[in-house]
Image (cartoon, rainbow, N blue to C red):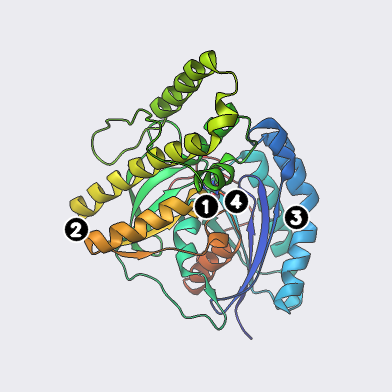
Amino acid sequence: MSINILGIESSCDDTSAAVVSEGVLLSNVIASQAVHCAYGGVVPELASRAHQQNIIPVVDQAIKQAGITKDQISAVAFTRGPGLLGSLLVGTSFAKGFALAANIPLIEVNHLQGHVLSQFVHEKDKPENHPSFPFLTLLVSGGHTQIILVKDYFDMEIIGTTIDDAAGEAFDKCAKVMALGYPGGPVIDRHAQQGDPERFHFAKPHIEGLNFSFSGLKTSFLYTLRDKLKDDPNFIDKNINDICASLQFTITSILIEKLVAAVEQTGINRITIGGGVAANSELRQVLKFEAKRYGWKVYIPERKYTTDNAAMIAGAGYYKFLKKEFVGMDIAPDARLKF
Ligand code: KG4
Ligand code: ZN
């Protein structure tokens, strides 16, 4: 019988389930939670409740779309952390219940390792395109901004990280100031496409080594808008495209500068990106441009595999299944899980 892995992802505000069969993705169902939009950020209590409502229909759909039945599932892989504890609890408890009832093994996956391994998600009838080890991953999401040295599937080292806000948080918080709703990244991305990235200048951090900082940029953004609004209360509406383009340009250049430094430091020029911010049009474009300039080999996943999804969890689970890396029923989620 084929090895069929059911993956469950519930670390933040997306409830997702996927089925991977012999390493090939058969289904990937994602229910995003619109409930947070009005609050300008994820409300943990509301996220857990929405996961509770969504998890069974989402899993049911993933199994049906995969064209298999639940008794053909060989193991359940779930996101153990890092993430919001209440959200992680829903996915973890569901995975444990499913594995217990079906008498199949349970596999824990670190959410960040899942993002890194999203590069290896293999769709049927599509050519495989992934880097050889070692490679560097720029992981940029709402909760994380890291450069990871990936030596093997589960042998990874964080060589640069944010000392305050994450890149996605910078997008979301600045969007909130402009009343653009949540998540802010995609809205800023859309406006930026018609804007002038050189029009406004926001502070860039001076942090040693490969670490990032975004809190100074956020403050500089806030103060710039506050000053401009004093002269013209309609300043944001009138300049929204240029403001978004300039902000996006600043965030992208902060990320790229550190990536250039990481390549110099490690001598590794195979690069992947992951996490929600990796869906950003400019970041994707600049990476391709820099790849040509510096002779990097850049692997850019499809947008649907950059934001939170269970395909990456099921895929990582498949590699763990082959190594028989299972966990017991006493496993608990860990909001600050490290690797
Ligand atoms: O990986 P993800 O779905 O969830 C976390 O683990 O955080 O990332 C969500 C983040 C949000 O901050 C969102 O604003 C950002 O990814 N994001 C984007 C874009 N699409 C999503 N940021 C910039 N440009 C985008 N196109
Ligand atoms: Zn994520």
Residue 168 in the image: state x and y as whole percent: 50, 41
| Residue sitting nearer the eye, 69 or 267 | 267
Q: Distance between the Cα atoms at labels 4 and 1?
A: 16 Å
Q: Specify whether 116 is left or right of 187.
A: left
Residue 288 in the image: state x and y as whole percent: 35, 61
- Crowd around label 1: few <14 · some 14–19 · many ≥20 (10 Å): many
Residue behind mark 2: 267
Q: Distance between the Cα atoms at labels 4 and 3?
A: 19 Å
Q: Earlier in the sequence, mark 1 or mark 2?
A: 1
Mark nearer the viewer, 4 or 3: 3
Q: Distance between the Cα atoms at labels 2 and 4?
A: 38 Å
- In the rendering, which numbered label is found on residue 55? 3
Q: Residue at x 78, y 66 (%)?
A: 60
Residue extending farthest to the bottom is 1
Tag 1, which secondary structure? helix
Mark nearer the viewer, 4 or 1: 1
Residue behind mark 4: 331
Identify the amino acid type marked 3: Ile
- Residues at marks 4 and 1 touching, judged by CB atoms closer than 8 Å: no
Residue 317 in the image: state x and y as whole percent: 54, 66
Q: Is residue 121 above or below residue 48?
A: below
- Residues at marks 1 and 3 touching, judged by CB atoms closer than 8 Å: no
Q: Is residue 39 above or below residue 248?
A: above
Residue behind mark 1: 111
Identify the amino acid type marked 2: Gly
Tag 2, which secondary structure? loop
Identify the amino acid type marked 1: His
Q: Distance between the Cα atoms at labels 3 and 2?
A: 43 Å
Does the residue tagged 1 have its C-beta within 8 Å of any atom of ligand 2? Answer: yes
Q: Distance between the Cα atoms at labels 1 and 2?
A: 27 Å
Tag 3, which secondary structure? helix
Whether residue 268 can be seen here? no
